[in-house]
């Protein structure tokens, strides 16, 4: 693939967000993409897998389709499958092992983690409330869920989840672990939350305000590199509101992330949210869906009061071509739950139920977890053994 057309390089750029969870790198850099081009609105992508019966094929298929179809000039995606030759497999394995050794990766996010970046056009629409409740609902289903508070100017996640926000650096057991940041943990039902806040990077909020733009983006990059997440099924990121340098840097650092856009039902909020969706497109981040928050308040006698307007979520979803995953009603318990570190997703009520419905939809349909147990025929262990006989 020496001569690349503009189309091809665009498809390849977006495919860099597709990880081979077993090999721990993206399928482009691993050399698994044989060809990629767009013809009459149809993108043709040929991917060579380690074994034709690769159990992760369904995951890779879904991720390729979601990403490539988010390109504006693509209306259809045709995936073609191929198998790596023995030589190619050796090279892919070497590359994967070199990566594992050198870990030049900008973050320590495991390749099998599903990364959801929760974004909004402006602050105060309930982005953090959505992040903590969705994380709680996902964890209660038995998943290990990382939560990164990347809203450096308005960090609030540790308080909302009721975890101790003092980060502990791992005791220097081995050299490479020295200075790593270990997330705070909170058990949630059958699962686990792992929480890290960029708020801890700065002494005071004034520092964050002083370090603007690129300098802050650099600091966030260093911080992200130092977090040792361990195993996580999902990683939810509470993004800073808006579309500045830090947001763009985060998008670049998290090529596997997909965006969830939070908006209020008001038309004005929906308009601002469209800009975030534009940023997602520009940084090749697919949009998973929209969540409308602060929808109609229901009085105890059942009357519905749309205090912050109506229909913004639906309009936004339609405009950006992503599904509306849920409308969270205005409910005082959402607010008190945030203040007391007891998210409504763990304490009940209608809003709590809806967070669980959204989580179910994510797990079952929108962004299923990657089940490494399916990889009993692990190519990492099998290939070196298989090679001599081929
Ligand atoms: N559905 C809701 N019902 C009632 N209060 C809410 C709801 N969603 C958010 N809030 C409250 O609104 C305020 C802003 O929410 P927050 O999640 O901090 O927004 P953001 O992270 O977008 O700035 C908080 O006080 C929060 O408790
Ligand atoms: Mg917030």
Image: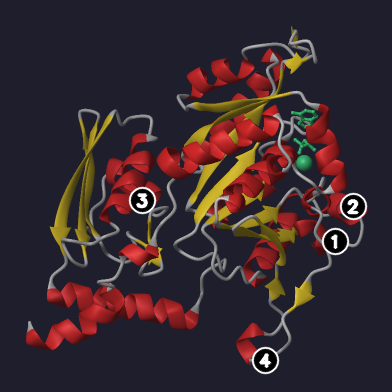
Instruction: From this view, report whether residue 313 is shown above or below residue 229.
Output: above
Q: CA distance from mark 1 to mark 2?
A: 7 Å
- Residue on which the image places disc 4: 173
Q: Do the residues under discs 4 and 2 have CB atoms within 8 angstroms?
A: no
Which residue has dot 1 on it? 202
Separation of disc 1 and disc 4 at Cα? 26 Å
Label 3 to label 1: alpha-carbon separation: 35 Å
Q: CA distance from mark 3 to mark 4?
A: 37 Å
The C terminus lies in which quarter of the figure? bottom left
Q: Which mark is residue 205?
A: 2
Q: Classify the position of the N terminus by image quarter.
A: bottom left
State the image coordinates of residue 15 (x, y, percent, origin top left): 36, 50
**Residue at the image position 36 percent from the left and 70 percent from the top:** 23
What is the secondary structure assignment of the residue under circle 1?
Answer: loop
**For mark 3, does the 10 Å Cα neighbourhood hold few (<14), some (14 to 19), or many (20 or more) residues?**
many
Point out residue 35 in the picture as x, y percentages from the top left corner: 20, 52
Query: Where 119 falls versus 296 (above or below)?
Result: below
SS for callout 2: helix
Q: Earlier in the sequence, mark 2 or mark 3?
A: 3
**Residue 200 screen position, x and y as percent:** 82, 62
Mark 2 crowd level (few <14, some 14–19, many ≥20, 10 Å Cα): some
Q: Are marks 2 and 3 in contact (CB under 8 Å)?
A: no
Q: Position of residue 121 (x, y in %)?
A: 68, 31
The tag on residue 15 is 3
SS at badge 3: helix
Question: What's the distance in space between the residues labelled 2 and 3, CA to CA?
Answer: 37 Å
Q: Earlier in the sequence, mark 4 or mark 2?
A: 4
Disc 4 element? loop
- Asked if the residue at tag 2 contacts the one at tag 1, i.e. Cβ–Cβ closer than 8 Å, the answer is yes
């Amino acid at each position: 693939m020496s001569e690349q057309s503009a189309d091809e390089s665009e498809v390849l750029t977006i495919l860099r967000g597709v990880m081979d969870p077993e090999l721990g790198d993206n399928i482009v850099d691993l050399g698994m993409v044989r060809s990629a081009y767009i013809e009459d609105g149809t993108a043709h992508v040929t991917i060579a897998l380690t074994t034709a019966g690769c159990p992760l094929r369904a995951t890779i298929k879904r991720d390729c389709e979601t990403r490539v179809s988010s390109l504006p000039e693509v209306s259809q995606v045709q995936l073609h499958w191929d198998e790596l030759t023995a030589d190619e497999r050796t090279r892919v394995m070497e590359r994967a092992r070199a990566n594992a050794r050198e870990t030049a990766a900008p973050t320590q996010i495991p390749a099998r983690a599903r990364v959801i970046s929760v974004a909004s056009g402006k602050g105060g629409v309930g982005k953090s409330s959505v992040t903590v409740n969705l994380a709680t609902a996902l964890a209660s289903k038995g998943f290990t869920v990382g939560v990164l508070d990347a809203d450096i100017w308005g960090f609030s996640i540790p308080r909302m989840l009721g975890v101790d926000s003092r980060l502990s650096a791992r005791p220097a057991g081995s050299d490479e672990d020295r200075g790593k940041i270990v997330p705070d943990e909170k058990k949630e039902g059958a699962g686990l939350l792992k929480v890290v806040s960029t708020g801890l990077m700065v002494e005071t909020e004034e520092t964050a305000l002083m370090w603007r733009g690129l300098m802050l983006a650099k600091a966030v990059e260093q911080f992200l590199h130092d977090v040792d997440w361990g195993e996580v099924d999902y990683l939810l990121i509470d993004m800073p509101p808006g579309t500045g340098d830090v947001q763009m840097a985060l998008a670049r650092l998290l090529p596997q992330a997909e965006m969830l856009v939070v908006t209020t039902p008001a038309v004005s909020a929906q308009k601002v949210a469209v800009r975030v969706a534009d940023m997602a497109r520009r940084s090749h981040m697919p949009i998973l869906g929209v969540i409308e928050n602060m929808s109609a308040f229901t009085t105890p006698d059942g009357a519905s009061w749309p205090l912050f307007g109506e229909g913004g979520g639906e309009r936004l979803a339609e405009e950006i071509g992503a599904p509306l995953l849920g409308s969270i009603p205005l409910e005082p318990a959402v607010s008190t739950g945030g203040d007391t570190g007891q998210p409504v997703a763990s304490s009940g009520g209608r809003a709590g139920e809806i967070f669980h419905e959204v989580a179910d939809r994510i797990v079952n349909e929108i962004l299923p977890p990657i089940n490494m147990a399916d990889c009993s025929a692990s190519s990492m262990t099998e290939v070196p053994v298989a090679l001599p006989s081929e």
